[in-house]
Amino acid sequence: MAGIKPQGKVKMKWSPGFAYALGLLASDGSLSKDGRHIDLTSKNRDQLETFLSCLHLNNVIGVKASGKNKISYRVQFGDVLFYNFLLSTGFMPAKSKILGELKIPKRYFFDFLRGSFDGDGTFYSYHDPRWKSSFMFYTVFVTASPTHLKWLRESISYRLGIRGHITHDKRRTTYQLKYAKSESIKLLEKLYESKSAPHLKRKYLKVQKALRIVGASI
């Protein structure tokens, strides 16, 4: 494929899995300043296993301890060609607060978005006490970069016609793009359109359970 040379450790060919892996990197990954190493850290070991599978890698998954009884998992590998490809796509070292638009093929945007959702996104539901039998849920994307979040919002709006709303914490260290129930249904149907595409099972089951309550499905 033009612009991607299948060399190095990573098989660089656009596919649902490849785009999903880039979504994980956009949320939880980092590029070393040495111009070579890529790192992905997660609390979910199965997420890293899926990440390695998507990139056709067999690296060992390491364990990181932080704080009292807090365990996370880590994958780190060196691949200059893949690193340079990520740079050409819009990634950068120390990206958390300055990441912007990424060059993702239109065909694979929602695979990328599902990876971003599985990385730093969240889904929560609750019964609204103001109205009886009122069940609400939100699909949320989280990032430290307002520019990246605005790009996500515009990209989703262009494809699905939904806008969501953006909030931030008091210190503006993190930003959230939230979609309420009706917009969430449209978005989730697209995120999980292909049942065989990679996803975080735990989050998928949580979404399924909430949608069943309102008579929807994915």
Image: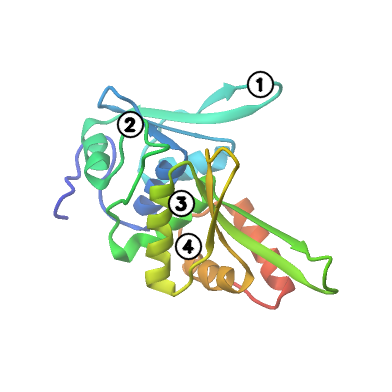
Q: Position of residue 159 (x, y in %)?
A: 39, 71
Left or right, residue 48 beside residue 108: right
Q: Which residue is mark 1?
A: 67
Crowd class of label 3 (few under 14; some 14 to 19; many from 20; radius 10 Å): many
Look at label 2 and name its amino acid.
Answer: Pro
Up/down of 74 relative to 23, above or below: above
Look at label 3 and name its amino acid.
Answer: Gly
Q: Position of residue 93 (x, y in %)?
A: 33, 31
Q: Tag 4, which secondary structure?
A: loop
* Of the image marks 4 and 3, the number of the one nearer the N terminus: 3
Q: Are marks 2 and 1 in contact (CB under 8 Å)?
A: no
* Of the image marks 4 and 1, the number of the one nearer the N terminus: 1
Q: Which residue is mark 2?
A: 93
Q: Residue at x 42, y 37 (%)?
A: 96
Q: Is residue 40 visible?
A: yes
Q: Which residue is mark 3?
A: 115
Look at label 1 and name its amino acid.
Answer: Gly
Q: CA distance from mark 4 to mark 3?
A: 14 Å
Q: CA distance from mark 4 to mark 1?
A: 36 Å
Look at label 4 and name its amino acid.
Answer: Ser
